[in-house]
Image (cartoon, rainbow, N blue to C red):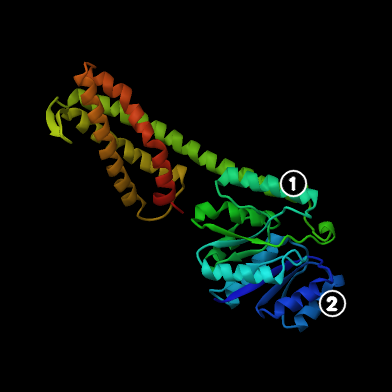
């Protein structure tokens, strides 16, 4: 496996020198990004360049996320198909753990590797509280369990890199956005426990508890709103088409003559209920496809219509069969056919509503 260690650095301490010396003993593939530290820190970066480390320079501070994107872009251009291990420069990640993440990525090339700190002992209160809030908020939002959402030690497979360059966020929120997109990208995280290291109560960190935490939480809330709004649009589309489907079904039942046939081993199935339900579903489905493609999911991909029709046919047959069987049983019990359809068609359709949303989002209109 070919990998590069990418380290963003903003006004690093002199203690970074022995750390880099130790890392050089394990790998020469190191990319360092000077995120606008200025002239005061130029001798330190020059010393690291003299050791054979590639140093990329921002003329001014642009944020950790931007520094990571600069490094990712450089590695993609010069060392294509290489994986990346991101690490911090403030001594929170040991060389041993960096190499453990690299090994985990080699063994799990389809996953994002997360070097998670246990955060149990000798952890500053602000860090313990902040990590707890972020961890639980992230889990509630995405359903994905990650113990340390704020760790900078990650193993990123090469196939993720082009997506990360398009990801929003130029500061610490970039790393949270990476985690928030995992489910949409279909990528699973794989977390390994690493050593928890805080030097001088983490005084060297440039993380602003108020501003940067606010930026991260803002991204989480945007993620929640985006998913919720998508579901609301889908619900509105489905409700509109449900009304069209329901009314169409009742209309067709008035114009299609009643007849019976044997179906699914039941005797005397009301044939016009089945046919009316099928015709109504065709009309509502074409309407639903147009709305979902253009408005709900804003999808521009190909072959979505073919996949959508396949889903419609499967759901149509299943829901129509269920409705027909229920109606037949209720009519046999003395209920009026039209009344049975009017009451139970909404119930049957509701059973397929959530399933439809996730199938369309994940398979048919997947971006």
Please name the residue that numbered disc 2 is placed on: 43
| Residue 127: percent from left, percent from top | 76, 51
* Percent position of residue 275, x then y: 20, 33
Q: Left or right: 337 with respect to 231?
A: left
As displayed, is residue 65 above or below residue 324? below
Q: Is 228 located above or below residue 110 in the figure?
A: above
Examine the image and state in which quarter residue 257 appears.
top left
Q: Position of residue 109 (x, y in %)?
A: 51, 67
What kind of element bears circle 1? Answer: helix
Disc number lying in front (1 or 2): 1
In the rendered image, the vertical position of residue 154 relative to residue 125, given as above or below: below
Question: Residue 246's quadrant in the figure?
Answer: top left
Residue at horizontal 35 percent and vertical 28 percent from the top: 347
Q: 348 or 63, which is in the foreground? A: 348
Q: Which residue bears the numbered disc 1?
A: 129
Counting other residues with Cα less than 10 Å from the Cα at mark 2, is it few (<14), some (14-19), or many (20 or more)? few
> Residue 328: x percent and y percent?
21, 25
- For the point 59% across and 42% down, the residue is 140
Disc 2, SS: helix
- Please give the count of numbered marks on the rendered protein: 2
* Any part of residue 291 in sight: no
- Image point 66% across, 79% down: which residue? 27
Is 283 placed left or right of 125 in the picture? left
């Amino acid at each position: 496996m070919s990998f590069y260690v990418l380290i963003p650095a903003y006004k690093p301490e002199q203690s970074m020198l022995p750390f880099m010396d130790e890392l050089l003993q394990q790998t020469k593939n190191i990319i360092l990004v000077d995120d606008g530290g200025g002239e005061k820190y130029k001798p330190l970066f020059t010393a690291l360049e003299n050791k054979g480390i590639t140093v990329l320079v921002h003329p001014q501070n642009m944020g950790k996320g931007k520094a990571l994107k600069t490094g990712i872009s450089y590695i993609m251009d010069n060392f294509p198909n290489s994986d990346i291990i991101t690490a911090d420069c403030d001594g929170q990640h040991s060389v041993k753990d960096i190499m453990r993440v690299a090994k985990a990525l080699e063994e799990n090339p389809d996953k994002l590797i997360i070097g998670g700190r246990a955060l149990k002992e000798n952890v500053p209160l602000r860090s313990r509280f902040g990590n707890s809030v972020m961890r639980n908020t992230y889990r509630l939002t995405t359903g994905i369990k990650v113990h340390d959402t704020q760790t900078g030690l990650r193993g990123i497979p090469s196939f993720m890199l082009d997506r990360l360059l398009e990801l929003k966020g130029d500061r610490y929120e970039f790393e949270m956005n990476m985690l928030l997109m995992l489910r949409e990208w279909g990528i699973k995280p794989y977390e390994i426990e690493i050593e928890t290291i805080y030097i001088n109560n983490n005084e060297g960190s440039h993380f602003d508890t108020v501003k940067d935490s606010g930026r991260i939480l803002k991204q989480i809330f945007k993620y929640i709103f985006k998913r919720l709004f998508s579901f609301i649009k889908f619900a509105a589309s489905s409700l509109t088409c449900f009304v069209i489907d329901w009314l169409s079904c009742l209309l067709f039942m008035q114009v299609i003559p009643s007849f019976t046939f044997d179906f699914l081993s039941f005797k005397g199935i009301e044939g016009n209920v089945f046919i009316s339900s099928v015709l109504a579903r065709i009309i509502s489905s074409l309407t639903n496809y147009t709305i979902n493609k253009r408005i709900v999911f804003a999808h521009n991909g190909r072959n979505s219509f073919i996949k959508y029709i396949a889903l419609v046919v499967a759901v149509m047959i299943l829901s129509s069969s269920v409705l027909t069987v229920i109606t037949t049983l209720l009519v046999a019990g003395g209920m009026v056919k039209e009344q049975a359809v009017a009451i139970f068609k909404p119930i049957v359709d509701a059973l397929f509503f959530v399933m439809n949303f996730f199938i369309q989002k994940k398979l048919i209109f997947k971006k």
